[in-house]
């Protein structure tokens, strides 16, 4: 079975109104359709939000892949976008779901975290209530030091003590003293994890932070070697990681050896394509037990036309061949920008 060509659809799907208002940016992505001489098409998705687009590389993609057999490609080592499409093609050809070509399945459903940008406390609480009502059990907050404690208190008051908060200030809590103070002030409010709270030029800060709080501390790292460095420095309780199939499984194995749970943020702001492929990857990783940061649910449309089973805060995988989803082409055209 040989690759015969590529099609691209760049789309810009609005975020939910409140998130769109406070996030303040568009985040287009490009759907990639890889065609074969046996009539099977595989789906991938590329990040097109920062001034580049995979369509700029169409000539090189054609030169590298057109005429090549899918069975002569090392699927596990390709980049995420084409990897998704190639696993989709191979799974469809063999009549098996993509995950079966990656590894044994450890879970039928892959939980997702809800997400919101930094916004006024009342808006964050309203989004948390929406998340809880939809069945999400973790809400990731882009946190600010001035408001995070009061926000966490009100979220727990609104959503109940079992609803968890993932605090992610992108190191903006700054110094170690502030990081420790806020961690301990947040402790009563069911903080699932404290992700990259302070600067990390010196990993001794993270080791010291862990000594002075019971809130689990996490880093967002993609390199297995850097993950190992953090583990050896006693700097982490959990890890947010990313990568293609080979890289993600390598990083996960390092964490598993240290008995550290992980979650992933492979693509984040994708539609059904990237999110579903991430779920196929994650269901094969035993220690990926935390809800992942893939966010099709914060847009007004996921482009799946209902073919992606997202309910109760999770992508529920089926045994349909390949990715097991189809695109709603009417929706694709509605949001298409090129």
Image: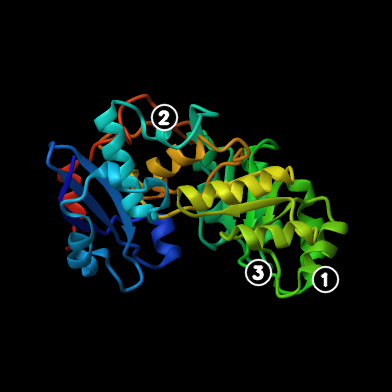
On screen, 152 above or below 61? above
On screen, 135 above or below 2? above
Residue, disc 3: 171
For the residues marked 3 and 2, what is the alpha-carbon distance in whole angstroms? 34 Å
Front position among marks 3 and 2? 2
**Is disc 2 placed on a helix, strand or loop?**
loop
Residue, disc 1: 177
Say which quarter of the image contains residue 337: bottom left
Question: Circles 2 and 1: CB distance less than 8 Å?
Answer: no
On screen, 47 above or below 246? below
Question: Can you say which quadrant of the picture contains the C terminus?
Answer: bottom left
Taking the image as shown, residue 58 lies to the left or right of residue 222, namely: left
Characterize the local packing of mark 1: few (<14), some (14-19) or many (20 or more) Cα atoms within 10 angstroms: few
For the residues marked 2 and 1, what is the alpha-carbon distance in whole angstroms? 44 Å
Characterize the local packing of mark 2: few (<14), some (14-19) or many (20 or more) Cα atoms within 10 angstroms: many
Q: Residue at x 53, y 28 (%)?
A: 107
- Give the residue at the far front of this rendering: 72
* Of 250 and 131, the residue lying toward us: 250
Residue 317, numbered label: 2
Residue 8: give x, y in percent of width and height: 19, 56
| Res 302 seen here | no
Front position among marks 2 and 1? 2
Question: Can you say which quadrant of the picture contains the N terminus?
Answer: top left
Residue 225: give x, y in percent of width and height: 64, 61
Residue 170: give x, y in percent of width and height: 61, 66
Residue 289: give x, y in percent of width and height: 61, 38
Characterize the local packing of mark 3: few (<14), some (14-19) or many (20 or more) Cα atoms within 10 angstroms: some
Q: Residue at x 80, y 69 (%)?
A: 205
Compare marks 3 and 2 and give the one earlier in the sequence: 3
Q: How does the figure colour the protein chain or chains?
A: rainbow
Compare marks 2 and 1 and give the one earlier in the sequence: 1
For the residues marked 1 and 3, what is the alpha-carbon distance in whole angstroms? 13 Å
């Amino acid at each position: 079975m040989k690759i015969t060509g590529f099609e691209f659809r760049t789309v810009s799907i609005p975020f939910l109104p409140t998130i769109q208002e406070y996030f303040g940016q568009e985040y287009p992505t490009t759907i990639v359709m890889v065609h074969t001489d046996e009539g099977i098409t595989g789906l991938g998705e590329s990040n097109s939000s920062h001034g580049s687009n995979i369509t700029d590389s169409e000539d090189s993609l054609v030169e590298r892949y057109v005429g090549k057999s899918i069975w002569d490609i090392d699927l596990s080592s390709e980049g995420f976008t084409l990897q998704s499409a190639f696993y989709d093609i191979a799974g469809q050809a063999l009549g098996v779901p993509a995950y079966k070509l990656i590894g044994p399945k450890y879970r039928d459903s892959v939980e997702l975290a809800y997400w919101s940008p930094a916004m006024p406390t009342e808006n964050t609480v309203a989004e948390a209530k929406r998340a809880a009502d939809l069945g999400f059990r973790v809400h990731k907050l882009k946190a600010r030091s001035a408001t995070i404690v009061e926000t966490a208190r009100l979220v727990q008051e609104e959503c109940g003590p079992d609803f968890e908060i993932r605090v992610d200030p992108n190191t903006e809590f700054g110094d170690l003293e502030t990081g420790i103070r806020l961690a301990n002030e947040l402790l009563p409010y069911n903080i699932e994890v404290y992700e990259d709270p302070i600067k990390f030029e010196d990993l001794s800060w993270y080791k010291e932070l862990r000594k002075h709080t019971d809130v689990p501390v996490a880093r967002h790292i993609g390199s297995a070697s850097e993950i190992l460095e953090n583990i050896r420095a006693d700097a982490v309780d959990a890890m947010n990681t990313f990568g293609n199939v080979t890289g993600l499984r390598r990083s996960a194995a390092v964490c598993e050896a240290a008995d550290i749970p992980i979650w992933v943020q492979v693509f984040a702001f994708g539609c059904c394509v990237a999110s579903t492929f991430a779920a196929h990857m994650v269901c094969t990783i035993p220690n990926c037990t935390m809800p992942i940061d893939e966010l099709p649910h914060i847009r007004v449309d996921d482009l799946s036309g209902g073919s992606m089973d997202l309910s109760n805060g999770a992508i529920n995988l089926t045994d349909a061949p390949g990715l097991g989803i189809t695109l709603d082409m009417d929706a694709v055209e509605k949001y298409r920008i090129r």
